[in-house]
Image (cartoon, grey):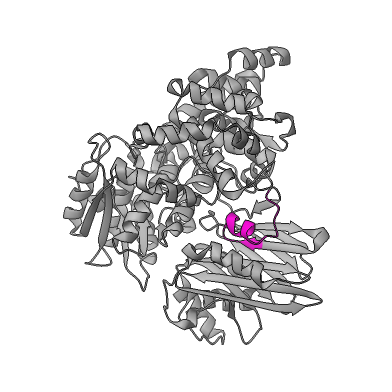
Amino acid sequence: MCGIAGIIASEVEPTSLERMLKAMHHRGPDDRGSEIFGHDHFQVGLGNTRLAIIDLSPAGHMPMRDPETGNWIVYNGEVYNYRGLRAELVKHGKRFRSLTDTEVILKAYAEWGLDCLGRLRGMFAFAIWDGTRGELVLARDRLGEKPLYYYADPERGLFVFASEVRALLASGLVPRLLDYSALSIYLHNGFLVSPRTLVRGVKSLLPGHWMRIDARGQVAGQGRYWRIPSSRTGVAEEARSRERLEALRETLAEVTAQRLVSDVPLGAFLSGGLDSSTIVALMTRCSNAIRTFSVGFPEPDFDESTYAQWVSSRFRTEHRTVSVTAEDFARWLPDGLAAMDQPTFDGLNTYCVARTARASGLTVALSGLGGDELFGGYPHFRQVPAIARGARFGTWLPHLLRRLVTRFVGGLHGWRKVVQVIGSPVPGYYAILGAYQVAQALFPASFQRRLLQRYEEVEGVWFGLPLEFVAFVDNDGRDEDELALLSRYTIRLFEGERLLRDTDSMGMANSLEIRTVFTDHVFIEAVWEFPGRTRCAGAPNKPFEVALVRPLLGEDYPVRPKHGFVFPFARWLQQSALRQKIFETLRDDALSFQAGLNPRAVRDIAEHAARMPWSRVWTLYVLLEWVRRHDLSV
């Protein structure tokens, strides 16, 4: 794991690059390096901070140069099949000077060009300076596990990229201005959605994409190298056949084994739930010395440590449970807020887990994240199809009636919020996506009109999504059954834009690499061979996955109704000291104005907080604190 950064400009100021790397020290405390070189009257600067995982020697130092081609690379991530690729490249005559996956990517690009991306299995974001072509090549993994942000100013001949938004701001080359449309996206979702960020002009490279930038800082081309396949139909009857389940089970075992490669202490998060328990069961196939880690709470209705202990005893892991209290949370909150590279109403639970895991001696931890998205582990797998039917009904209402329904009946809660989808009917193929966005909305459009200073300036946003993202998922593949389509959207949006981003930023804030198993693209392709109406049926209790993994866990594994890994978050935030701090921030009119919000509307929310879900209050508080910390304004 690492932080990467780079600048193309007429003159690269070393201090700008150094400030970017300093801002990402937490991503790579083991080593830091930078290189600046010239090309056609322009300069290129590359930098890296390194968290050493594979080959801990100085041979893994970056930026790394290929002496045969003159190419340079800075890289963040893990390519799990690097040993097989290395063996193949050796047969092609390539010589290696390290044991790193970094050098494998560098040699793979020299051998296959951009086609090398289709051969990589893992999570990654990298930049390669192609000396022959005089171009910078950026690429990001298929699911978006590793972040990659950039800022382009063609008039100045400037291009800047980094693993984190705050590193771009630290460069001094990016204006500290809020993107008003991105602000609307954040308020709708509680997080940002690619390619938008809250900083005007700063974009996120979409998952599964590459980009080429010439020596003058101009984008020379971009493209996509992977899509989730379209789902198959007509095989529901054989979907649970023993042979097909066994094949999928073995694919999952292979994927898990690949993620155990490490030269530093490695373990697993274990909640005792289905997904994490399955990962631990498969890890013990490969090793007799598995370390597991879980978080417990004094609040018995939130504590699941007994289930984790059962799994640990069954598979004989070296287990540790750390109890996190409200006092711990209050003490860690400032650091948790500071860890947010972009504002998010989620993520603090991951921060707490990552912090305690790192303190317990782990450098790498496997996670069960991703199983719920594949197998229907959320209530919205039941709710959204019904809402979509309402969206289709809305297309039959006269336009004026739809507007009146939305204005006078719509609201922030329950069915009143769902009315939004009737007021803004969507084409049939987008009905599921629109319904999903309505169901998840924190502040729908009807409320944002009061909350935003200049709502009329919001452009290019559809149901809280950037139009570029809508085009991205539209071009991702077509599914004929609604649950497969909903699974696709949940992977791309809830998982890709929220969970994986929070996992990266909160894990790396603690210099902890978190590896997710269910996000492997080969496993996803195998899962997509099963109809969504089969694998996602019975939400949120995932009966298909239970059948899949039961042979791994044993007949006596205590399967229970889906609970989810939830912190006593809202309860802790109601404590007097924390509550007072939050409301002081919400009543700071100057800060609300700086963040593009209507101070009176923000104060109203604070005064009526008892009548609305705490997540909405928290969403605004996080936004205001982020704007204050990074000194942005509209």
| Residue 319 forms part of the magenta stretch | no
Whether residue 207 is visible = yes
Whether residue 570 is visible = no
Where residue 631 appears, x then y in whole percent?
62, 47
Q: Quadrant of residue 252?
A: bottom left
Magenta span of residues: 161-176
Horizontally, residue 366 falls left or right of residue 99, namely: left
Q: Residue at x 50, y 18 (%)?
A: 415
Q: Residue at x 56, y 70 (%)?
A: 48
Marker count (numbered): 0
Q: Which part of the image, by quadrant, shows the C terminus?
A: top right
Where residue 188 appears, x then y in whole percent?
58, 33
Horizontally, residue 306 falls left or right of residue 256, namely: left
Where residue 522 appears, x then y in whole percent?
47, 58
Where residue 363 appears, x then y in whole percent?
36, 65
Q: Residue at x 64, y 64 (%)?
A: 138
* Of the pair 415 and 616, the residue shown nearer to us: 616
* Of the pair 449 and 88, the residue shown nearer to us: 449
Position above or below: 7 against 632: below
* Of the pair 523 and 320, the residue shown nearer to us: 320
Position above or below: 485 against 212: above
